[in-house]
Image: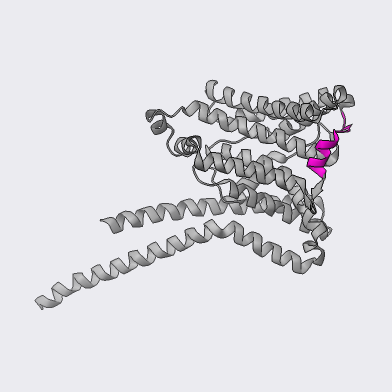
Amino acid sequence: MARAVIDRPESVAVTGGQREAGGFSSVSLGLRLLSAGPVLILIALIAVVSLMTPNFLKPVNIGNIVAQTAVIAIVAVGQHLVILTRGIDLSVGANLALATVIGGLVFRVSDSAALVMLAMILSGVAVGAVNGLVYVFGRLPHPFIITLATLSICRGLALELSIGHTTMRGMPEAIATIGGGSTFGIPNSFFVVVAVAALAALMAKRMVWGRWIYAVAAAPQAAREMGIPVKWVLISTYVISGLCAGIGAIVLSGRTEAASPLYGNLLELDTIAAVIIGGASFLGGRGHVGHALVGAVMIGVIRNALNLMNVSVFFQMIAIGVVIVVAVEADVLRNYLEGRARNLQAARAQ
């Protein structure tokens, strides 16, 4: 009888340990699937669409997807850095429109491609700097406020400054080549995306500044106590977001060979969607540039597929909205599973 009493706790302990191990492994598997989810979904999406529309995988159409996605991908890289710090930049679309208008006005007085591109980049950076400086030193509760304000300001300025308040035709040949040309059948805008993404990834992963971003996102107060310049780190992300909007303006104005105050409409939503769909989190501190690129390509594939199937543009907007909801719910599930994993790890350690 005594032996049975002794054996029973051991049996219970083994069973409990097995349950903990099983629970931990299932949670870990769920996290891995969520991490790989965006890429797997993109692959599955491409496979399904290619079966439904044979023209999808033709080189010409692939080139169209790359060209149409380039601007979203470039601007999404900057948006990704902002979201990484638990922020948001709603002004990127209007910022891009204003940058194209500034570039178009400079082109009226000088046909120098370098000068026009510099004007667009400086315009984007200036708006990004205003966003960051007002948010940080104005002690605003959230960047939503200032970036929403600059969205309206930039769009109004773009409309006011553009000649006749409409599209201005013409861009230097070099800019048209960057935005609309191709090399060996590959759109030149693809190389711009690769360069921007590679530079952002290098800065985020290999430089001290990149480690500071993750530290600020994870624990701002602890980062301050460690001597990290939290305010300037935050400002830098908005400046880079503005820089990416300026580069996106160069690509878009080159592809259309025009400048317009109406460019970039809803681009802020596309870039936010790209970052979140790709697997980043609104809670900050998690993600890499690849997330933004995967999300941007997914948006491009969805839109292109719906165009090939002659689906109304209004239903395309609905489709993107549904994808955003699914991505946000995936982020909620990921946070829940991470919490479960931490609890199970703590239980196993005890």
Q: Is residue 5 above or below residue 132?
A: below
Q: Is residue 83 above or below residue 227?
A: below
Magenta residues, as a range? 166-180
Q: Is residue 233 left or right of residue 123?
A: left
Q: Tell me, yes or no, if residue 241 can be seen here.
A: yes
Q: Tell me, yes or no, if residue 144 can be seen here.
A: no
Is 1 covered by the magenta stretch? no
Relative image position of residue 340 (x, y in whole percent): 40, 55
Q: Is residue 6 left or right of residue 92?
A: left
Q: Nearer the viewer, residue 177 or 63?
A: 177
Q: Nearer the viewer, residue 115 or 222?
A: 115
Q: Which residue is painted at 80% across and 48% down in the image? A: 182
Relative image position of residue 50 (x, y in whole percent): 75, 66
Is 167 covered by the magenta stretch? yes
The quadrant of the picture occupied by the N terminus is: bottom left
When asked about the image quadrant of residue 181, the answer is top right
Q: Is residue 129 left or right of residue 32?
A: right
Q: Which residue is painted at 77% across and 58% down in the image? A: 305
When asked about the image quadrant of residue 146, the answer is top right
Q: Which residue is painted at 66% across and 64% down in the image? A: 44
Q: Residue furthest bottom?
A: 1
Relative image position of residue 15 (x, y in whole percent): 28, 70
